[in-house]
Amino acid sequence: MGRSPCCDKVGLKKGPWTPEEDQKLLAYIEEHGHGSWRALPAKAGLQRCGKSCRLRWTNYLRPDIKRGKFSLQEEQTIIQLHALLGNRWSAIATHLPKRTDNEIKNYWNTHLKKRLAKMGIDPVTHKPKNDALLSGDGQSKSAANLSHMAQWESARLEAEARLVRESKLRSHSLQHQLGNSGVPMPPRSLDILKGWNGAWSKSTEGNGGVPAVTAIGSDLESPTSTLTFSENAPPVLTAGVGDNSMRMIEFVGSTSGSSETRAVKEEGEEDNWKPFENSTHVPEYKEGIENSLSFTSSLHDLSISMEGTWTPESLRTSGTGHIHFGNVMGDEGFTDLLLNNSDDLSLSDGGDDSDKGSGSEYSEDNKNYWNSILNLVNSSPSDSPMF
DNA sequence: AACACTGTCAACCGCCTTGAT
DNA sequence: CATCAAGGCGGTTGACAGTGT
């Protein structure tokens, strides 16, 4: 039916914010919290619509925003997550807590997208523009594999978003007592990547190779996602409810700061998961379940044996019961690859990317590109600020 | 110095989702 | 179930700055 713009009232200011307006907004939120955005402008004495105030706060005035140049690590993270999640900037932003979705989106559009394009890589699909080069060698199947994982992640993000919302509701009154600054809570988000990059080695140490991927985030208060592969069953997605008869990858809550996988959820948490479990309005989740079933075949397409357990270590190494993501590139870092190629290719870029795909040098770049993503996903950067 | 072109990014717009009624 | 209000998200715009000619 459509909705009239929220800013169409006469007298409401649009355009760039002045320092005075910023000060008014900051002062009000610091004292009262933002509460209802629609009601805020009048209370704060601003001639703006609530939407504009919210945007100014979340994208600029929030005290927990890191501004300035993106680090190589952040670039890597953005590219990885974009390959997995697509243009879901808010989801990507949850993994870069000090960056806003708007900032990430801008950076992608102005820097990273162009850089990938110059490399002959479709920034939308993250596939080489001349995909024929890679067909049949397992690279594109690895990409499909990533896509499945992305669907899992999408479904899980939806669920975690629910958790955040409900958690916020529960804690709202408490926050007020503590002096609500309006600062958003830390993202209740740990994901497959975090599990891979940060906690796999921990979770498998001294536990006899228990097939659970426990993401451990001491700085996060949320229940963490646990990826469990039953020994003889294909992985399926569940929502942290252990009594489901379906064969599932279980996302089981675990207490942060503890290395123990926790199968018992926090009080009331199960209810939070129920909408997710029985979701009828999250098509991605349902699709994720369906695709997770086909994921097994994808794994087999990659010559992966699932007869053993799927552990973090097994993903990092090849062998029986282990997943091997093809030829992992050597020491060349992904961002280095991008940076190097961006310079080289920008000099030789004649505007016709399709030509580049025909060169053997270029096909190597394309292979390296996917190898890089897979390698990064597999790697466990101990110095990563994110994981 | 002046102009054109390009890049950057804050802000807006329109649509979607969610929750209340 | 329908409707509405509100918040959130992603795409797009436009002002400004920087660079090239």
Image: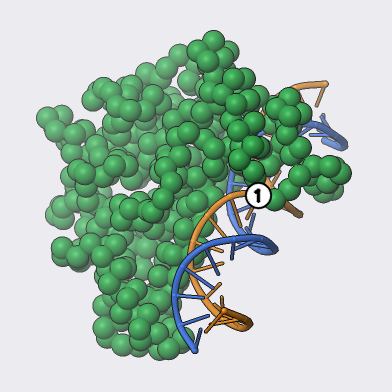
Chain colours: A green, B orange, C blue
> What is the quadrant of residue A254 in the picture?
top left
Q: Is residue A338 left or right of residue A61?
A: left
Residue drawn at the location 45% of the way across and 39% of the way down: A65
Residue A246 visible at all? no
Please name whichever residue, A296 or A240, is drawn nearer the observer in this view of the structure: A240
Chain of the residue under the numbered disc 1 shown in the image: A
Residue with the most extreme top position: A177
Circle 1: element type: loop
The answer, for residue A217, to whether it is visible in the render is yes
Give the side of residue A176 with respect to residue A361, left or right: right
Tell me the quadrant of the picture where the C terminus of chain A can be found: top left
Q: Position of residue A153 (x, y in %)?
A: 44, 45
- In the rendered image of this protein, does residue A136 appear above or below residue A332? below
Which residue carries the number 1 mark? Answer: A16
Residue A332's place in the image compared with A72, above or below, is: below
* A151, above or below C18, in the image: above
- Image-based side of A57 in relation to A78, left or right: right
Q: Position of residue A323 (x, y in %)?
A: 23, 54
The picture places residue A172, in percent across and down from the top left corner, at 57, 17
In the image shown, does A104 or A167 lie closer to the viewer?
A: A104
- Residue drawn where x is 26% and y is 22% of the image: A258
